[in-house]
């Protein structure tokens, strides 16, 4: 995991929480979760955008991931774009990742700035890496985690006629969801559960294709939560000057499932196939080879 975390740090982010359950429509909610979970292939996009104020100026930065997935045998192509209007944060750069499972072997291929690496990884690590960029898995997660979820009407969403659901993510679930989805990555590192004490529930909106009963998008407004975390960070650094304190003007997680049950090109480029192999010294060869944790 140590080396795998190193190469996937290039993609640190992601996108987003997703979950859904406890809805007033009960059985309908379960059907939506089941249908969405059974998709054999899909494409989507996750956006994480922050607007932060400090010292009287605002900084905009964010991360956008485009993903195409085939579930059996597993294949995922992920394209990441990170951008900022502050040159000190790196401006804009792009990265690419492929995740494949063949004959029980899980392999991650990561390309950044013309350099490629690959690694055979354990099943548990592999699943975590995928979850960070997967709008379908995250959307199902949100539906399962949401409370007070209700259908507030039908509207056009990304070309679909969609039922719009609104609810909240209970504060007790927030630390694990923020960690597992990587949605906290634009805020900072080493933020443990204590930072979330007394945080408020998170509002979540989920769109479901009215015709097929498939989740096609979601939105999380994390502005209040991030300001709560910033207050905790400011306290830990004993920041007293208001101009030195961070404040989130906005912090949004949004995702769309652009297509599903579609054809996915699973051909790996030569540069990925010929990438240097990183050996993870925290797992033995047999566990890596059979894909088991």
Image (cartoon, rainbow, N blue to C red):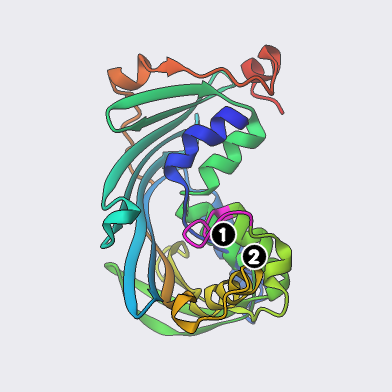
**Vertical placement of residue 243 versus 106, above or below:** below
Mark 1 crowdedness (10 Å alpha carbons): few <14, some 14-19, many ≥20:
many
Tag 2 secondary structure: helix
Residue that badge 1 annotates:
140
User: Which is nearer the eye, 249 or 275?
Assistant: 249
Residue 275: numbered disc? none
Tag 1 secondary structure: helix
Residue 236 seen from this side: yes
User: Which is nearer the eye, 271 or 214?
Assistant: 271
Q: Is residue 172 magenta?
A: no
Identified at 73% across, 67% down, the residue is: 194
Identified at 53% across, 77% down, the residue is: 227
Q: Is residue 95 left or right of residue 236?
A: left
Q: In this view, does 148 lie to the left or right of 99?
A: right
Marks 1 and 2, how far apart at CA? 6 Å
Considering the image in quadrants, where does the N terminus appear? top right
Q: Given the current orientation, which residue lies at the most extreme bottom position? A: 152
Q: What is the magenta range?
A: 181-190
Q: Is residue 265 left or right of residue 27?
A: left
Residue 46: image x %, image y %? Answer: 39, 57
Considering the image in quadrants, where does the C terminus appear? top right
**Vertical placement of residue 86 versus 240, above or below:** above
Residue that badge 2 annotates:
144
User: Which is nearer the eye, 16 or 9?
Assistant: 9
Residue 260 seen from this side: no
């Amino acid at each position: 995991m140590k080396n795998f975390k190193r190469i996937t740090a290039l993609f640190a982010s992601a996108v987003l929480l997703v979950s859904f359950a406890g809805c007033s429509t009960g059985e309908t909610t379960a059907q939506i979760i089941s249908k969405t979970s059974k998709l054999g292939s899909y494409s989507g996009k996750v956006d994480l955008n922050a607007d932060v104020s400090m010292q009287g100026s605002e900084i905009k930065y964010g991360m956008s991931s485009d993903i195409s997935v085939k579930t059996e045998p597993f294949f995922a192509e992920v394209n990441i774009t990170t951008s900022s209007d502050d040159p000190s944060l790196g401006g804009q750069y792009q990265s690419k990742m492929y995740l494949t499972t063949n004959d029980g072997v899980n392999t991650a291929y990561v390309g950044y700035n013309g350099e490629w690496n690959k690694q055979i990884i354990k099943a548990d690590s592999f699943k975590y890496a995928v979850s960070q960029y997967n709008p379908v898995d995250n959307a199902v997660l949100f539906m399962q985690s949401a409370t007070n979820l209700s259908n507030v009407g039908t509207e056009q969403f990304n070309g679909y006629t969609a039922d719009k659901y609104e609810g909240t993510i209970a504060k007790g679930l927030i630390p694990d969801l923020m960690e597992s989805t990587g949605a906290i990555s634009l805020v900072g590192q080493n933020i443990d559960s204590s930072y979330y004490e007394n945080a408020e529930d998170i509002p979540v909106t989920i769109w479901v294709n009215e015709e097929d009963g498939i989740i096609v998008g979601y939105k999380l407004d994390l502005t209040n939560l991030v300001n709560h975390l910033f207050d905790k960070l400011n306290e830990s650094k004993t920041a007293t000057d208001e101009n030195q304190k961070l404040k989130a003007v906005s912090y949004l997680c949004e995702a769309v499932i652009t297509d599903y049950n579609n054809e996915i090109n699973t051909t790996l480029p030569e540069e990925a196939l010929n990438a240097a192999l990183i050996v993870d010294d925290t797992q033995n060869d047999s566990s890596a080879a059979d894909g088991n944790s």
